[in-house]
Image: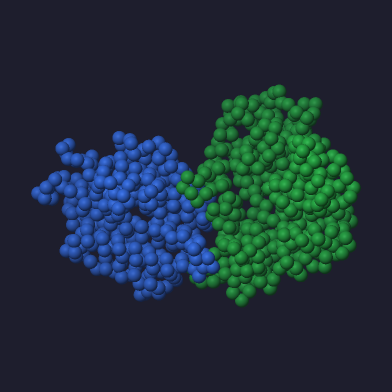
Chain colours: A blue, B green
Amino acid sequence: MLSRVANSIYWLGRYSERAENYARFIDVNFNLMLDLPQDLKEQWEPLIQATGDYPVFVNKYGLDFDRKNVIYFLAFDEDNPNSVLSSVTNARENARIIRENLSKETWEKLNETYLFVKEGKDKKIWKKEDPRAFFERVKSAILLLYGLADSTVARTEGWYFRQLGQFLERADKTSRMLDVKYHILLPSPQEVGSPLDFLHWMALLKSVTAFNTYRRLYGNIDPSSVVEFLVLNKYFPRSVFYCLKAAEECLFKISGSNGQGFSNSAEKAMGELRSRLEYDDVEDVIKSGLHEYLDDLQFKLNQISNHIDTNFFQIKDNFEHQINYQG
Amino acid sequence: MQITNYNIEGNYDEMYSADGSCRPHYEKFQAFLNKVPKRKLAQLQFSANKTQMAMGMTFNVYHDKQGVEKILHLDIIPRIIPSDEWQKVEAGLKQRIYALNLFLQDIYNEGKILKDKVIPSDLILKSKDYLKPCIGLTPPKNIWCHITGTDLVKDKDGEYYVLEDNLRCPSGVSYMLESREIIKRAHPDLFNTLGVRPVSDYPTKLLNMLQFLSDKSKPVIGVLTPGVYNSAYFEHSYLAQQMGVELVIGMDLMVKNKKVYMQTTKGLEKIDVLYRRIDDTFMDPMAFNPNSMLGVPGILEAYKAGNIAIANAPGTGVADDKAVYAYVPRIIKYYMDEEPILSNVPTYLCREEDDRKYVLENIEHLVVKETNAAGGYGMLIGPKADKEEHTKFRQLVKSNPDNYIAQPTLSLSTVPTITDNAIEGRHVDLRPYILYGEDIEVIPGALTRVALKKGSLVVNSSQGGGSKDTWVLY
């Protein structure tokens, strides 16, 4: 497969997943806010902190973390390179570059999703009292794309590059979703473990479609169990560990190695991080501090992405400046 | 919806004769139109537009965030061509392409036609499209012009005339194919009733032709595109997808030991055949334009060494120069000893005395063009210019006759077209596609471009042109 094509497929996977997760972010905060006692102010700042878009936001809007501002910024703002609209646009742009590698249906559905999100901007969805139906549709549209791919794409190199992008992005976003809870302030320290605190954890689980599974596996809502579930669980397809394991397998399929040790620097970095999570328990996570642990995780995920880039996408170019950087 | 008050306004109309009667090959379509309510017709047109947008059948896409993606308006009333009429077009195009191919081989090698003074040598040798690095070259299987999209128009007399040969990288074939898919949804029953010849196997034929150029049983083939910001990118990726071959940009390729390789995730892979969609002089910065960012340095050396086939062959462009165009009837006669089946637009070469005399006497009725200028520069449209300009051009022609040709102003035939509130005649041209591989094959379909503005003769998409599906009947 052409290096340039592999690069675009990888980013197609990342941007689709990013768009879906940003739709989820907005959803989780909405659910959290609905359960707040009346005298408490809505908190939208934590979302901006958790997604890592804080500097871009403050630069444009100052410290006005108003709900409409934040929803606009995360969903429709083209100055925010990670917003739903930017991500869908980038996914579509990458798809357009490699359209010859996609099925007609895949391209058309992605194109429709793009047109739908753009229309959402024209309709000023962020001004709505309850915009959740819109974000629900964004999620469905992307899940439909995954379904299409699942039943139509041949399991050859391209498939694994897309999956690789998708799982790395999901690992990052699940960790950030969990971080939202860290940034949300409770009215007082006494509220830790209060009904309000539990409501928060439940809303968080629901936003990653994990609530029912969690209930079956763990029963009671308990912060450390939620952390264990979303970071270390071996079977839940949105947990960080599961995503890393799946991404690692993609790397093995791509290089054709047997999964013993590593055959390139991307596999090495991936294997190190995966095995760390494999042998950590939730006490290790809490001990190092949840936020710090997640922060480090995100840093390492970025390094892995850089290794993937060096190993597979860098080409000995005739015209170096034509290569555009994506991030 | 009945077509009423349809006025052919002195043009040749493809559906109605001068006496107002429907031409036989349109009768079944007229019966269909009469039955469809006006609102339903508008609905069909609306959903055709919608489908094009959803399919991403767009052109003119810019990098800029504000960039516009436009669709080429597709009118749902087809342009229908009866079988006997098509047979002549087909025979004429085959003859023309066959002769032009012989011509190209000749002028880059022996130059017999120049020595025999059928065509003035300086006309060819001084042309900027005559590529010196290609002299002495014989391309694989002796084919120069593999893919052609000839522009034809029909004048008031109902005869086809060749307007341009388009031997370089003619575009629009994806519109022919995708428009057909959309129109099939709009008129599902009519295809059988009328007996419309299919075009959907074009990508297969194109692939077979490209495979034929290599001696390998399974050659590696690529479509070379200038990139995603090119206005025809949709077409490039569409063709690569339909053929199941790689779509490559210059950056993906490199030349080593006079062989061309693609850079893949698993290292270098040799490529055998390239369908290039970039201009001659941008193909190789080492051989032609050193500023080209789009090409592949050294590819011409690989081509000369016979390690890669390129379609169309570099150097082909010289045969569709404006002045060379005037000689095509003589080219056909010279190589084939046949009379041309399809007419040229009568062209007066000011370098020849009789022609020059005629041009000077009739300049107010003629279009005068500079031979080596493009894009409407250095042009006089006689009927629209004033006396002062006529005088100025008479002087220009006299002082530098080699530099000018003249043609009569042509009319274009019309086809009924849906407008805001009615069905009216609009002017059309015709671009059929011809593949030259083991045989020369004319695809039984075409891109019909239509000038959507009333009375306009400009069919270009950038200036209010649209398209129609073209139905060639069995």
On the picture, is A198 further left or further right than B232?
left
Q: Quadrant of residue B217?
A: bottom right
Identify which residue is drawn at 60% across, 36% down: B186
On the picture, is B143 further left or further right than A65?
right
Does B95 appear above or below B158?
A: below
Does B111 appear above or below B379?
A: below
On the question of residue A109 being in view, the answer is no
| Image quarter hosting the N terminus of chain B | top right
Q: x and y percent of residue B265 in the render?
A: 49, 68
Q: Nearer the viewer, residue A269 or A59?
A: A59
Identify which residue is drawn at 84% across, 52% down: B351
Identify which residue is drawn at 69% across, 63% down: B314
On the picture, is B365 further left or further right than B424?
right
On the question of residue B459 being in view, the answer is yes
Q: x and y percent of residue B332 in the render?
A: 84, 55
Q: Quadrant of residue B416?
A: top right
Q: Nearer the viewer, residue B126 or B472?
A: B126
Does A277 appear above or below A61?
A: below
Does B40 appear above or below A53?
A: above
Identify which residue is drawn at 68% across, 73% down: B305
| Image quarter hosting the C terminus of chain B | top right
Q: Nearer the viewer, residue B15 or B111?
A: B111
Q: Quadrant of residue A120?
A: top left
Pick out the residue farthest to the left: A190
Q: x and y percent of residue B51 in the render?
A: 54, 41
- State how many labels appear: 0
